[in-house]
Amino acid sequence: MSNIQNMKILQVNLVNWYLKSHRKLPWRATADPYHIWVSEVMLQQTQVNTVIPYYRTFLKEFPNLKHLARANQQQVLKVWEGLGYYARARNLHRAAQIVLEKHGGSIPSNLVDFKKLPGVGDYIAAAVLSIAFDRPFAVVDGNVKRVLARLFLESAPVNQSSSHRIYKDKAEKILDRNDPAAFNQAVMELGALICTPRNPACGSCPVQSLCRAYQSGKVSAYPKRIKKQPVPQYHIAVGIVYKNGRVLITRRKPEGLLGGLWEFPGGKVDKKEAPQTACIREIKEEVNLKVGIDDYLTQVRHAYTHFKIVMDIYCCRYVSGRVKLRGPVDYCWITLEEIDRYPFPKANHKFIPLLKQKG
């Protein structure tokens, strides 16, 4: 793809294909920068079909930037509950507040100001500014990298951070600067629908004639990836502490993994330690309560991006002590009927229905 003519063919074919073949998604039916921003934040590391109901619910609850900015964080996390990667929600919420305070409620359309906002990195900046404001910035996500690797026979591993600049440069090189909104979406859509990781539909590809991987019969060999180390697995013990018909929940500190969410007290089981012992120890260390175990509720497994957990959950009775927090930033004694008011991590939702059933 060394000459200008081939570049123009690539751009025209991709955009024409996109205009005829793209999926009808709710965020593509709006020109509202706020709605587009919300969709792009949700779509980071999350599949389209998972995002759609959350997107609709979020905009029903917070229909514009002012509504979001004036909400409290717990409201935002509750609506985001289950979507994961909660730093996205916290950053979007804080960014909306900054836009309201410093930009009069208008989302900045220039790169410098927009990238100063919490949670706005290269991808979000390029996606929102190109799609909402037609600014000429190339988007680079996993789908785009796969398309570029095959188009150019690029051997840089797509999952290696040092390769990002290589793919960014190639994306900038082929970007249609006259229609960056349609072009960026076209490349991403091509990766999602045609140039898929396995069994790509090369026969339906609008840029097949320009794809070096296809022309050389090497499509299945690209993109290149470095082999990841297996993720560690941790054993966790958690206690449902009952006292006077209520149970104890604690809130995590606002930053970091699952920041701001509520959970039941507990923690990691040490080597050679019984999970029941760990449960009692962790509750004492975290909230300063002495408890006894009455019953075993269940075990759940959950996978995060960089690790997995196996969680044993115990029903405990309060014995003595007053709550003093070491780690959590807040606590509450609630009835099980009130539990749906609070945002919990997805791992907790795997046993909350059983807990309600038990009563």
Image (cartoon, helix red, strand yellow):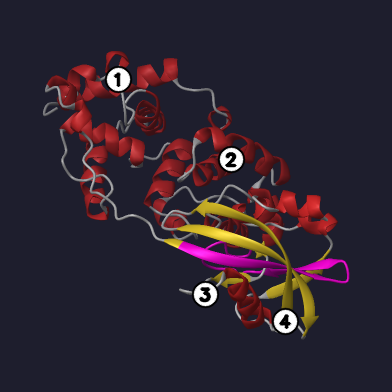
Residue 148 location (% of width, % of height): 24, 34
142 left or right, relative to 150 = right
Q: Nearer the viewer, mark 3 or mark 2?
A: 3
Q: Is residue 244 magenta?
A: yes
| C-alpha separation, residue under disc 2 versus residue under disc 4 | 45 Å
Q: Residues within 10 Å of mark 4 (few under 14, many from 20)?
A: many
Cα gap from disc 1 to disc 4, whole angstroms: 67 Å
Q: Earlier in the sequence, mark 3 or mark 1?
A: 1
- Name the residue type under label 3: Glu
The amino acid type of the residue labelled 1 equals: Val
> Residue tagged by mark 2?
35
Q: Which residue is mark 1?
A: 12
Residue 94 in view = no
Q: Is residue 168 above or below residue 102?
A: above
Rounded to the nearest angstrom, the CA distance separating label 3 from label 2 is: 49 Å
Front one among 98 and 242: 242
**Numbered range of the magenta stretch:** 234-260
| Total numbered labels | 4
In the figure, 66 relative to 276: above or below?
above
Tell me if label 4 and label 3 are in contact, CB under 8 Å. Answer: no
Location of residue 8 in the rendering, given as x and y in whole percent from the top left corner: 23, 23
Q: Which residue is tagged 4?
A: 289
The circle drawn on residue 285 is none
> Going from the N terminus, do you reach mark 4 or mark 3 first?
3
